[in-house]
Every structure is written in C-alpha cells, then in structure tokens.
Image (spheres, rainbow, N blue to C red):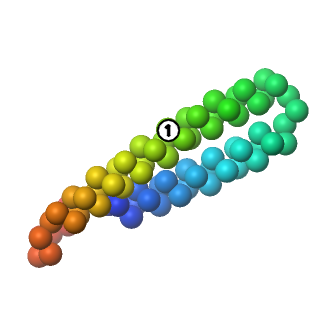
Amino acid sequence: MSADESLNNAENLLARLEAARARLDETQDADQAIEILQELAELAKEVEAELQRAKRAAETEAAQPPDAPAS
C-alpha cells in the first residue's frame, strides 16, 4: 500500500470519527454514549495504524532510487 493510499484511508477514518463524535454530542442516552465512545476509541486506533503505515510507506518510497520500480 502506498503512502497516498494510507493517507486516504486515514482521511476516511477521520471522517467516520468526526461523524461518531457528532452523534455523541447529540445523544442523551448513557448506553448509546458508551457505545459511541468505544467506537471512537477503535476509530482512533485505526487512524493511528493507518498513519504509521503511511509513514513507513513514505520512508520506503523515499529510500528507493528514482529508477527503481514501485512495489
């Protein structure tokens, strides 16, 4: 996966995170709030993992000679 693909995935996850945060702001139900908080925690972990993948991919791409084929 390229750095750009990982960054796009992270952006999509961030959009989902923002939508979940908005749902949390709107809810008055404690049980639903707990579920949304768990979802937010999972999404945050996924965003962090994607950003780490993007970083590794960018470092790999930067280390390749200009004439090397992309993997």
Mark 1 nearby-residue class (10 Å; few <14, some 14–19, many ≥20) = few
Q: Which residue is drawn at 29% across and 61% down?
A: 58
Q: Quadrant of residue 63?
A: bottom left
**Residue 25 can be seen in this image:** yes
**Residue 1 can be seen in this image:** no
Kind of residue at disc 1:
Lys
**Image location (x, y in percent) of residue 13:** 55, 50
Identify the residue position indicated by label 1 in the image: 45
Q: Residue at x 22, y 66 (%)?
A: 62
**Image location (x, y in percent) of residue 69:** 15, 69
Residue 14 shown left or right of residue 46 in the figure: right
**Image location (x, y in percent) of residue 55:** 33, 55
* Quadrant (top left, top right, bottom left, bottom right) of the N terminus: bottom left
Vertical side of 71 occupied by 16: above or below: above
Residue 53 shown left or right of residue 40 in the figure: left
Residue 17 shown left or right of residue 47 in the figure: right
Vertical side of 62 occupied by 19: above or below: above
Residue 21 shown left or right of residue 10 in the figure: right
**Image location (x, y in percent) of residue 22:** 76, 47
Q: In front: 16, or 59?
A: 59
Q: What element does badge 1 sit on?
A: helix
Vertical side of 21 occupied by 69: above or below: below
In the image, farthest residue toward the top: 31
In the image, farthest residue toward the bottom: 67
Q: In which quarter of the image is residue 65?
A: bottom left
* Quadrant (top left, top right, bottom left, bottom right) of the C terminus: bottom left
Q: Residue at x 42, y 51 (%)?
A: 51
